[in-house]
Image: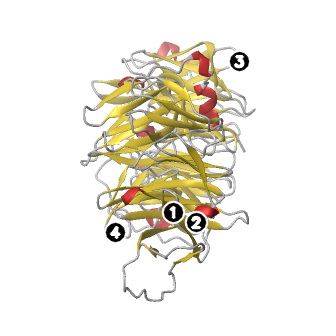
Amino acid sequence: MLGRGAPLIVVAWVACTPTAPVLAPIPPMSTGKVRVRVFTEPSPVKTVTTVGRFVFVATDRHVERWDGEGSVIPLSAEQGLSGTQIVAVAPDPDRRWVWILTESGLGYYDAGLEAYRAQPAPPPALALDLAAIAKEGATLAPSSDDGVWLGTAHGLLHASAQGVWAATPIKDPIRALARDHAGWLWVATPSGLLVRKPTGETVPVGAAEGCAITGPRLLVELPGDRLLVIGSDDAGHELVAIGKQLAWTTYRALPDIKWDAAARRGDGAVVMGGERVYRISPATPGRVRPLSRDGMRLVAMTTGAPEWVIDPLDVQTPPGAMSLGAAGDQLLIGTRELGTARYRDGDARPRDWLRRRPMFQDATKLSVACAREQDCWIATGARQAWHWTGGGFVPGGPDELVLAVVRDPDGAIYALHRGVTENQIRLSRIDGTTWTLVSRVALATPGDAPEINFARFAASGALWVGLRYREGGELRAHGIAVVDPATGKVSYHRTEADPKDQGKMLPIPAGAIDADVHGDTAYFATNEGIARLTRGEVKLWTVADGLRSELARAVTIAANGHVIVATAAGAGRWNGKAWDFPAALRFDVNDVVATRNGQVWMATDRGIAAWDGHKVRRVDTRRGLAENHILDIATDQYDRLWARGPGSLTLISQ
């Protein structure tokens, strides 16, 4: 933003640079504390499962099909999937199917035929509102007759392979479902564990059968028609029960731990809790288990031989781990913001990741505008913008290229966008999730693909937009446009205009690629040097005036009034009298912004550098970044830093 005290959103264009100088090392991070939050995927991974040769990853909006080569196909409406919200997913390994429930329909993906088949809609007589079920949550389990069981907050239903829907006598809210190969359907409800026998009879499974869990929530089918149940007893103690049909043994893990996820693996299961992963497996007769500081024990709470043991795995769980899966010798951990980590046997850290990175496809630059602390819009220059509400990102706005989002001094949020084939840039105001076009605003440039170098609001409420366009595949800057959103009036300013029109224009270099303003003075990073506009007059600094490079990439005004410029030769500082390039800042800088707390942030190919005027700190992969190559950065009104890499978005707060 332009204006003192207003949020700053920086959109930088990397110009062609001369041969890069020898890079000076970035000084190490000082003792300053920052919170680093990294996003590579827009939605949490709710379920990870394997069918045939494919791994299926379910998020809120897609089911992603991954093959062994790391190629991915997002199953969505283009593949026939009904709806846009993924409610539940369940594998049917015997048939190589994956059942998928959305807010609009039910169907399955055939991994053998690599095709999706939708089921007929439920009959009106059932009064089944899938949209309401999507809000309440649901669970699925394959049935023995090629159909599927559907557990909802209002009970259990069945849909046959022929699309015949039927209700059942079970009307309890259902938390989880699992079916063993003998045809017994296991149902986790808030009041206890139920089982529906192949005969259709439903019976409770409780203490009389050896299952002391009264609040089951996780069910995992084990080999030999056994079942693993995780939940709690009436006192709230976390318990594990393992059984077959009506014979069970309940265990308590010592030390106590809250289990978050579980999945079948090999002859047992893997479970996750307390930011660690453990393996539950059959006990080996005669094996003496050594004592260890981080060991775990299963203590039998009911009658029955202690036939199962638990052991920690030497696996470092990624941040935000929330779901588990297994495929052969692979362990899969789904996360809230980083995709799915994939481990091989013996790996302590992820060998690789399943990441589709839709937020970064065709991205060209970063801009951020926040209405509230947990309500921000992010634009990358690609199709649509991303609406962040603290828990994930949802695409929003028109299906067009969103070139920038920007917040005015009064708090209103605007977006600059155009159709893929259009040659004019339009302006919309964003209220909540509603986009409203601002009439009469249509920014034009030469060429067929107008783009934006930067977008800034001045304290006066005028929106300054740095323009560029493509000609023969080459990007060319084209001065600025000044927009009055209230009236829709647009004026253009650049030095390469027709001399007869120059009197009506501000003499701003046509090659301006970034800007910042303090009071009535604006500074521009251009391909000719640094320009200052004040009272209608322009002053241009070049290498003859102390710059180490005239090809400036970005510019910002720090809280103390100093002007900081980013170049391939380092970061320079204008103190009001002269330019200097501090020795600590003589490294290649892609972008620069300043926050109101006095911090200057720099995007580099080796992470993010933070400078307080004296010391330089560094945030890199050792401090939580997903990658060290940072392309551009932006700040919001909460003094938070947003940073974009080729495949990640980082939020840094202090």
- Residue count near mark 1 (Cα–Cα under 10 Å), binned few <14, some 14–19, many ≥20: some
Amino acid of disc 1: Ala
Q: Which of 208 and 376 is in front in this view?
A: 208
Residue found 45% across the figure and 74% down from its top: 307
User: Of discs 3 and 2, which sits in the foreground?
Assistant: 2
Which residue carries the number 4 mark?
Answer: 347
Which residue in the structure is indicated by mark 2? 210
Between 103 and 176, the residue placed more toward the observer is: 176
**Residue 519 falls in image quadrant:** top right
| Residue 80 as seen in the image, left or right of residue 546 | left
Label 1 to label 3: alpha-carbon separation = 74 Å
Q: Mark 1 points at which residue?
A: 247
- Sequence-wise, which precedes: disc 2 or disc 1? 2
Question: Where 610 sits versus 452, above or below?
Answer: below
Q: Report the front residue among 276 and 300.
A: 300
Mark sitting earlier along the chain (4/3): 4
Closer to the chain start, of discs 1 and 3, is 1
Residue carrying label 3: 486
Residue type pointed to by label 4: Asp
Tell me, yes or no, whether the two marked residues, 2 and 1, touch with CB atoms within 8 Å: yes
Q: Which amino acid does label 3 sit on?
A: Ala
The mark lying in front, picked from 1 and 3, is 1
- Relative to 173, say whether 500 is above or below: above
Q: What element carries label 2?
A: loop
